[in-house]
Amino acid sequence: MFIVSFRFKPVLPYSFELTVQKPTGWSWFTPYEIWEKGTIWSGFWFETSGRGKKRKIPLGVKAHSSGKSVIVDVYSPRELSRGEKLRLKDMMRDSLGISEDLRPFYRLLRKDRLLRPLVRRLYGMREGWGMNIFSSLTLAVLLQMAPIKRSQDMWACLLQSYGRRIRFDGKSVLLWPKSSAFPWSDPEGIPGNMMIASGV
């Protein structure tokens, strides 16, 4: 296992916990990430282009805040090239909202009597993102016209059936599946447990 480490200094005010652990329950990269004592363990698929061939490899991510910095350790099954490390650094910076300056937004919100309490409650939270297009589209389909409990059951079933479990730093995290993980291409091939979870 190869480890690449990054240290970021976000534009203040910044809340690492609110950024990666949304109050509404949305995850940073995968619903099965682990949060313990100010540290998050998560993971995602990273596209590489070794030997002129594109492929995706699973990366584990461990992140926490330290003073005014955010420390990110990325665990890779192989050594990444210099170009891949630079791209990965940009991805991590964007996924944590490190460069976003919310001060003008806060000044505006403080003038609104109804929105002012939100500034206090969510102070320093960034939108952050960690999902790729495929996982975002999958989630959009699973959330359509269904009660939230059914949607949660469907995506839990999907991840447990087709997701990839990675182990790093003594933790185990289940990743969203990549599109090539699905052995079926039409509704006839959808597993029975998925059909039951969806209520079909």
Image: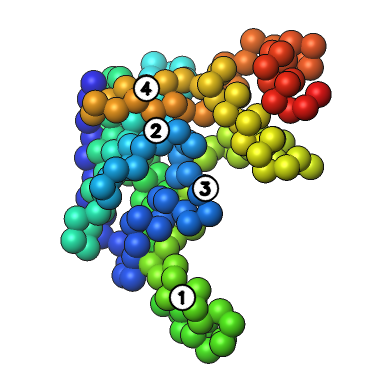
Q: Which residue is mark 1?
A: 119
Is label 2 in contact with label 4 (beta carbons under 8 Å)?
yes
Q: Which residue is at 30% across, 62% downward?
A: 10
Foreground disc of the pair 3, 2: 3
Quarter-of-image position of residue 199: top right
| Residue 11, position as x, y percentages in the image | 32, 67
Q: Which residue is mark 3?
A: 26
| Residue 158, position as x, y percentages in the image | 60, 24
Give the left or right position of residue 170, taking residue 33 as reference.
Answer: left
- At label 1, the amino acid type is Val
Is label 3 in contact with label 2 (beta carbons under 8 Å)?
no
How far separated are the C-alphas under marks 3 and 4? 20 Å
Foreground disc of the pair 1, 2: 1
Q: Earlier in the sequence, mark 1 or mark 3?
A: 3
Q: Quick check: 33 above or below 92?
A: above
Q: Which residue is mark 2?
A: 43
As rendered, which of 156 and 86 lies closer to the eye? 156
Dot 2, how many residues are within 10 Å of its Cα: few (below 14), some (14-19), or many (20+)? many
Q: Secondary structure at mark 4?
A: strand
Q: Earlier in the sequence, mark 2 or mark 4?
A: 2
Q: Secondary structure at mark 3?
A: loop
Is label 1 in contact with label 3 (beta carbons under 8 Å)?
no
- At label 4, the amino acid type is Ile
Is label 1 in contact with label 4 (beta carbons under 8 Å)?
no
As rendered, which of 140 and 77 lies closer to the eye? 140
Q: Which residue is mark 4?
A: 166
